[in-house]
Amino acid sequence: MKDKRIVCNKCKKELPQEKGITMADFIEINKKWGYFSKKDGTTCNFILCEECSDKLIASLEIPANISDTTELV
């Protein structure tokens, strides 16, 4: 079985994998645009590594809601 490469769309860093398991976490955005947008019928999909995600969140004018999770599944 060949590993599927996971690459950050922002910095182009390839996330490490071992035996088909990605050894770093990332955000995957999959947005299907609908009515009332200029992109109706378009789907946008991209991946951000943890570092690029942190930079994006830090750049927001209105802070993101971030909370702790007590159980990781």
Image (spheres, rainbow, N blue to C red):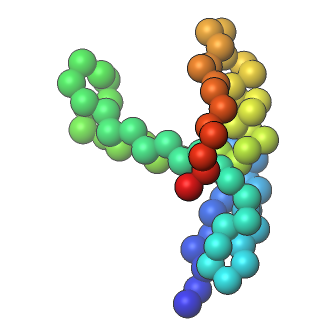
The structure residue drawn at horizontal position 50% and vertical position 42%, both measured from the top left corner, is 29
Farthest residue toward the bottom? 1
Query: Looking at the image, which residue is at 61% across and 19% down?
Result: 64
Vertical arrangement, residue 66 with respect to residue 50, above or below: above
Where residue 42 appears, as percent x and y from the top left, is: 31, 40
In the image, what residue occupies the spot 43% across and 44% down? 30
* In the displayed structure image, the side of residue 49 where residue 31 appears, left or right: left
Q: Residue furthest front?
A: 70
Res 25 visible: yes
52, 19: nearer the viewer: 19
Q: Nearer the viewer, residue 20 or 42?
A: 20
Image quadrant in which you'd find residue 20? bottom right
Q: Is residue 51 above or below residue 16?
A: above
> In the displayed image of the protein, which residue is found farthest to the left?
35
Using the rendered image of the protein, determine whether residue 9 is visible from the camera's viewpoint. Answer: no
Q: Is residue 37 left or right of residue 29?
A: left
Q: Position of residue 11 (x, y in %)?
A: 75, 47
Tell me: 32 left or right of 18.
left
Near-viewer residue (45 or 28): 28
The quadrant the C terminus occupies is bottom right
